[in-house]
């Protein structure tokens, strides 16, 4: 076991701490401008996002408007629209007591029957009924982690009004929707107190290069930042805030390179990866070296996952390989400059060991690749659920096959992950934080823009020049 | 039925820091300045000691009877490691540094749902992993754990003082000339009411940087000054002084302070101004030229590096690792500050908690065996000396 030690992600901590120490009395008012990359056509949790980018953008915007019975916070599960809950021993019958006095965006009070209807629509197999100030849920199968499941945005409580209008209870209400923008207004009677800003204007379809120039040009207050852009922004004294490491960048060998007989070859290639250099140089200290699928803050067992120890090929053996076995065609997403930069660094490291790695970022048809470098988001939830979701994103085309945990127990997740890593078909490289650039207009407060477990915290932001 | 959490979410909601609660929190009479650490990847260690028994049983079960292990833990988990070692020994497992012993690499950590201790036992094909988990309670936090310095004023007077110690509900105040017994010192009246005073009779001239320390045991007390030791009783109030160089009660064996000097020395050659006790017999010394020196329990220098004029250690802090408060300077006000650091191995990890003192810190004494430290501050503007008790507040 190798203890996890990294100087990476240091900048994020420093910036966050500086923000905390520089806390000032917040002011009310103003319109906050935020950019997102994808165009979100609907915030309706019942609709399916077209792709991962749209899913990521919606995951940021929707919680501003809609809330769930429970919420996942950096320190675990918290009550949100439910104030408490209990279940039977099997976890099939649940009772959620609703928080009283929650005012919806149409100024009516949230009733248990409305919450029941919202969940019933999402989970038709469940029996969901209001019961006084509570609602009861009967699942057909034991669901001991139901409160964790309900924290997912897909189970947000949405009240459907006439004309298909969606009504939520979050800190902002939808005021105006354009094809490429949302205007959200502060929800005055919000149960956790009104946000500081009066409105949030979200511009969609802004690619990451445009977002940086929007921030630099004073046209945006909050943008998404790539790790490769951090230095550029901090040199201009713009704030960059980071979440915990949320995304896994991993090397996946394709089927023709995945035979058991080639495991020493894969292990040898994996051993050439200089994670510290990738993290510190390529990703400008905004990432952490990864030897596991799940970061430790999600699994809590990362430090006992076996690393890439084992017999590797000596340099002479690599040199003696036929050229086609020494050459690896590594495919990356042509639209993702971060993985391209990592891939180029992998190629340098591999070359020193005698391999030839050719980075391929095809826009169209291209020769069959030997491996892919992919970036997948690890959701902030229970380890079994996070692993299942990450595995689903890793094996998006049915490859590689991943055995899911046999149950919610942590050791089952550990075994599934260790088993996947032992094959060296998926090789974790780094865990990357979610990064946000913040304009000088945004006042420093004790709450950072970037939530530790991903997404924005816009209700706690305030703008300079507002009212005390 | 399993009970869910009945959490008052408002307490950490939007009004939590920015709204009505925020400003009053900073104006608490305790003068505590508390800042919340950023939830980031560098997590605060949590107390996993309650998992130790089950964890040790799992390791012992995996080893079989009569095993011998080489146990390593994450470096910031000394407390749980010590407990696991104790429990393994009680189960007949021998703890060894020998290379022939089975390597057991363990770590305790926390995910969003549970607290986990995991151990890798053995290597290669014989490798096994055992885990012990506990559901994470609502109060279990990692990065959100707040550890802050709290400064509690206990006494103030115009004249310089060297140390203040509680004796029952009264205070003993040590100055260069006397030991004074003070009653009725409260938050509303920090001056209290001097009820008795005895002069320190010494023939010698005090050094320019005079230092003094009090030790109270029941109704008796001792006052230590360079080259002079005084002994007294509270009731009746007596004091007898003698020219004696005695070890001072500072948490490290020492030869006292020589007359006309201001530094301590030890028989094994350390010369230092202050000592902050750490865990497992380790100490952090403020050595010559204010260099901070880690000394291990074998009285060997483990590390040297940063500098500070004053340091206090907190043994019974809430976290799994010791904390120290180091003196610094607030650039805006030119006042002294105390900044909190977590001690991880021989590294000082800065925490956000900083307290700005009302003036210049003249004395800082760590408590021996745990408890609050004592600070004496010279408030130039107010023209007085103030005594504070310094503690760590630990909110989860």
Image: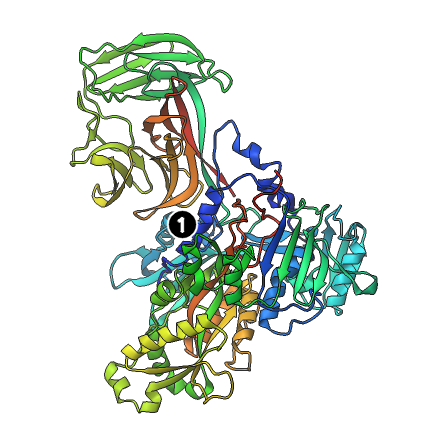
- Vertical placement of B105 versus A310: above or below? above
Q: Residue furthest right?
A: A162
Residue A203 visible here: yes
- SS for callout 1: helix
User: Which residue is under mark 1?
Assistant: B80
- Vertical placement of A394 versus A119: above or below? below
Q: Nearer the viewer, residue A401 or B19?
A: B19
Residue visible at 33% across and 28% down in the picture: B364
Query: Which quarter of the figure is the C terminus of chain A placed in?
Result: top right
Residue A6: percent from left, percent from top: 36, 59
Which chain is disc 1 placed on? B
Q: Nearer the viewer, residue A126 or A451?
A: A451
Q: Residue furthest front?
A: A217
Residue visible at 47% across and 35% down in the picture: B33
- Vertical placement of A24 versus A272: above or below? above
Residue visible at 26% across and 89% down in the picture: A320
Residue B234: percent from left, percent from top: 37, 12
Residue B279: percent from left, percent from top: 33, 42
Q: Is residue A231 left or right of residue A180?
A: left
Residue visible at 46% across and 74% down in the picture: A419
- Vertical placement of B252 versus A90: above or below? above
Residue B95: percent from left, percent from top: 31, 55
- Asked where in the image residue B210 lies, by quadrant, the reply is top left
Q: Nearer the viewer, residue B129 or B197?
A: B197
Query: Which quarter of the figure is the N terminus of chain A placed in?
Result: bottom left
């Amino acid at each position: 076991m190798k203890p996890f030690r990294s100087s990476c992600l240091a900048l994020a901590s420093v910036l966050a701490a500086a923000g905390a120490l520089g806390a000032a009395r917040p002011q009310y008012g103003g319109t906050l401008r935020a950019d997102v990359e994808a165009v979100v056509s609907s915030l309706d949790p019942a609709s399916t996002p077209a792709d991962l980018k749209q899913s990521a953008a919606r995951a940021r915007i929707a919680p501003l408007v809609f809330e769930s019975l429970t919420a996942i916070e950096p320190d675990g599960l918290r009550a949100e629209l439910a104030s408490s809950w209990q279940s039977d021993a099997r976890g099939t019958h649940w009772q959620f007591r609703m928080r009283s006095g929650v005012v919806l965006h149409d100024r009516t009070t949230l009733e248990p029957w409305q919450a029941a209807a919202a969940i019933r629509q999402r989970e038709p197999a469940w029996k969901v009924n209001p019961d006084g100030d509570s609602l009861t849920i009967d699942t057909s199968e034991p669901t001991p982690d139901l409160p964790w499941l309900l924290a997912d945005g897909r189970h947000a409580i949405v009240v459907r009004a006439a004309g298909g209008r969606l009504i939520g209870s979050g800190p902002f209400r939808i005021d105006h929707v354009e094809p490429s923008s949302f205007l959200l207004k502060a929800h005055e009677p919000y149960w956790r107190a009104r946000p500081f800003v009066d409105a949030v204007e979200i511009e969609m379809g802004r690619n990451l290069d445009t977002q940086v120039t929007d921030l630099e040009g004073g046209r945006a207050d909050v943008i998404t930042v790539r790790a490769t852009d951090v230095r550029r922004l901090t040199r201009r004294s713009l704030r960059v805030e980071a979440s915990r490491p949320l995304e896994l960048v991993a090397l996946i060998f394709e089927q023709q390179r995945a035979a058991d007989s080639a495991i020493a070859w894969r292990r040898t290639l994996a051993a050439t990866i200089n994670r510290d250099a990738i993290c510190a140089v390529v990703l400008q200290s905004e990432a952490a070296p990864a030897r596991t699928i799940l970061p430790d803050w999600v699994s809590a067992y990362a430090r006992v996952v076996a690393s890439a120890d084992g017999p590797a090929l000596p340099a002479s053996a690599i040199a003696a390989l036929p050229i086609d076995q020494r050459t690896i065609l590594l495919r990356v997403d042509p639209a993702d400059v971060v993985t391209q930069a990592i891939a180029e660094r992998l190629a340098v490291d591999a070359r020193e060991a005698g391999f030839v790695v050719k980075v391929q970022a095809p826009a169209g048809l291209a020769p069959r690749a030997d491996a892919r470098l992919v970036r997948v988001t690890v959701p902030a939830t229970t380890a079994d659920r996070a692993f299942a979701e990450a595995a689903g994103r890793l094996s998006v085309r049915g490859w590689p096959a991943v055995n899911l945990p046999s149950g919610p127990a942590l050791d089952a997740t550990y075994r599934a992950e260790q088993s996947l890593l032992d094959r060296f078909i998926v090789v974790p490289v780094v865990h990357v934080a979610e990064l946000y650039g913040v304009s000088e207009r945004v006042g420093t407060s004790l709450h950072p823009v970037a939530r530790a477990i991903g997404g924005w915290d816009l209700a706690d932001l305030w703008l300079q020049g507002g009212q005390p | 039925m399993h009970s869910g959490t009945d959490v008052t979410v408002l307490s950490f909601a939007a009004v939590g820091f920015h709204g009505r609660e925020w400003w009053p929190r900073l104006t608490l009479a305790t003068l505590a300045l508390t800042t919340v650490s950023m939830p980031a990847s560098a997590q605060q260690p949590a107390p996993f000691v309650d998992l130790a028994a089950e964890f040790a049983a799992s390791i012992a079960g995996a080893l079989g009877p009569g095993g011998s292990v080489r146990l390593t833990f994450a470096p910031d988990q000394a407390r749980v490691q010590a407990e696991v070692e104790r429990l393994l020994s009680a189960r007949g497992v021998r703890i060894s540094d020998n290379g022939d012993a089975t390597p057991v690499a363990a770590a305790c950590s926390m995910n969003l749902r549970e607290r986990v201790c995991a151990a890798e036992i053995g290597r290669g094909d014989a490798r096994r992993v055992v885990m012990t988990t506990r559901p994470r309670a609502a109060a279990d936090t990692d990065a959100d754990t707040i550890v802050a310095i709290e400064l509690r004023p206990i006494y103030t007077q115009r004249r310089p003082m060297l140390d203040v110690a509680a004796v029952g509900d009264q205070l003993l105040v040590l100055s260069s000339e006397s030991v004074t017994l003070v009653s009725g010192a409260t938050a509303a009246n920090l001056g209290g009411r001097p009820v008795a005073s005895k002069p320190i009779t010494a023939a010698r001239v005090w050094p320019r940087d005079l230092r003094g320390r009090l030790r109270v045991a029941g109704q008796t007390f001792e006052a230590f000054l360079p080259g002079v030791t005084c002994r007294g009783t509270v009731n009746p109030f007596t004091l007898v002084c003698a020219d004696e160089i005695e070890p001072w009660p500072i948490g490290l064996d020492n030869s006292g302070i020589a007359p006309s000097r201001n530094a301590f020395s030890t028989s094994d050659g350390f010369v230092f101004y202050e000592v902050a006790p750490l865990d497992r017999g380790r100490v952090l010394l403020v050595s010559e030229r204010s260099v901070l020196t880690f000394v291990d329990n074998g009285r060997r220098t483990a590390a040297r590096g940063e500098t500070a004029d004053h340091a206090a250690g907190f043994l019974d802090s809430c976290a799994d690792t010791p904390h120290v408060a180091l003196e610094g300077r607030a650039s805006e006000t030119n006042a002294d500050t105390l900044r909190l650091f977590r001690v991880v191995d021989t590294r000082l990890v800065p925490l956000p908690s900083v307290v700005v003192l009302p003036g210049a810190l003249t004395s800082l004494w760590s408590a021996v065996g745990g408890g609050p430290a004592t600070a004496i501050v010279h408030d130039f503007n107010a023209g007085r000396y103030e005594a504070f008790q310094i503690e760590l507040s630990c909110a989860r």
